[in-house]
Amino acid sequence: QVQLVESGGGLVQAGDSLRLSCATSGGTMRWLAWFRQAPGKERQFVAAMGWTGTTRYHADDVKGRFSISRDNAKKQFSLEMNNLKPEDTATYFCAAGNPITSAVRDPANYRDWGQGTQVTVSS
C-alpha cells in the first residue's frame, strides 16, 4: 500500500499558478495520478504518469496549462498548474494504482488516495 499526502492548495485569482505536491511512502504502483472533484460533481481525471515518468497523460481541459511530474529524490510527484481558471476550482486528490494503460483515467482503478487539497480560483 502507498501512503500519499498532498500539499500546496490555496486561494488564487484567475491567471495565477499553483503547484500541488504529493509525498509518497510505503510502496510503488504502476501509475501516479491527479484527480479533482467539485461539489456535486463526480471525481474527474486531471493527469497521470507512469511510475518511471516516461509516459504522461493530461485531460483535454488542462492540456497545455497543467503538467504532472515527479521528483524521485524527494519521493513525491507534483502537478504544476498555470493560467488557472474559475472552473478549475475543486478538491484535488493524488492517487496511486495499477490500471491498464487504457484505464488510467478511471478513478475506480486507483487503490490508494491522498486526503485532498482545496484549490479555489476566483474570477
Image (spheres, rainbow, N blue to C red):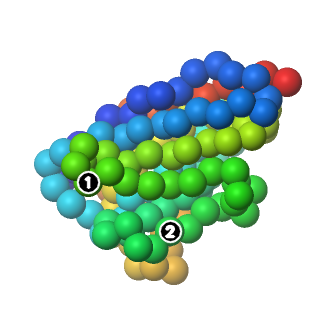
Asked if 78 appears above or below 121 in the picture, the reply is below
The alpha-carbon separation of the residues under discs 2 and 1 comes to 16 Å
| Residue nearest the viewer, comparing 52 with 118 | 52
Left-right relation of 17 to 110? right
Asked if 114 appears above or below 29 in the picture, the reply is above
Residue at horizontal 56 percent and vertical 68 percent from the top:
57
* Residue that lies at the very extreme toward the left in this rendered image: 26
Q: Secondary structure at mark 2?
A: strand
Left-right relation of 27 to 17? left
Disc 1 residue crowd, few under 14, some 14–19, many 20+, Cα 10 Å: few
The amino acid beneath tag 2 is: Arg
* Residue that lies at the very extreme toward the right in this rendered image: 123
Residue 85 is at least partly visible in this image: yes
Residue at horizontal 53 percent and vertical 27 percent from the top:
9
Residue 28 picture location, percent across and down = 21, 60
Asked if 34 appears above or below 53 in the picture, the reply is above
Residue 112 is at least partly visible in this image: no
User: Residue at label 2?
Assistant: 56
Circle nearer the viewer, 2 or 1: 1
Mark earlier in primary sequence (2, 1) = 2
| Residue nearest the viewer, comparing 48 with 91 | 48
Residue 104 picture location, percent across and down = 48, 69
Left-right relation of 47 to 86? left
Q: Where is the C terminus found, in terms of image quarters?
A: top right
| Residue nearest the viewer, comparing 7 with 110 | 7
Residue at horizontal 47 percent and vertical 28 percent from the top:
8
Residue 75 picture location, percent across and down = 24, 47
Residue 15 picture location, percent across and down = 78, 33
| Residue nearest the viewer, comparing 67 with 116 | 67
Left-right relation of 90 to 57? right
Residue 72: numbered disc: 1
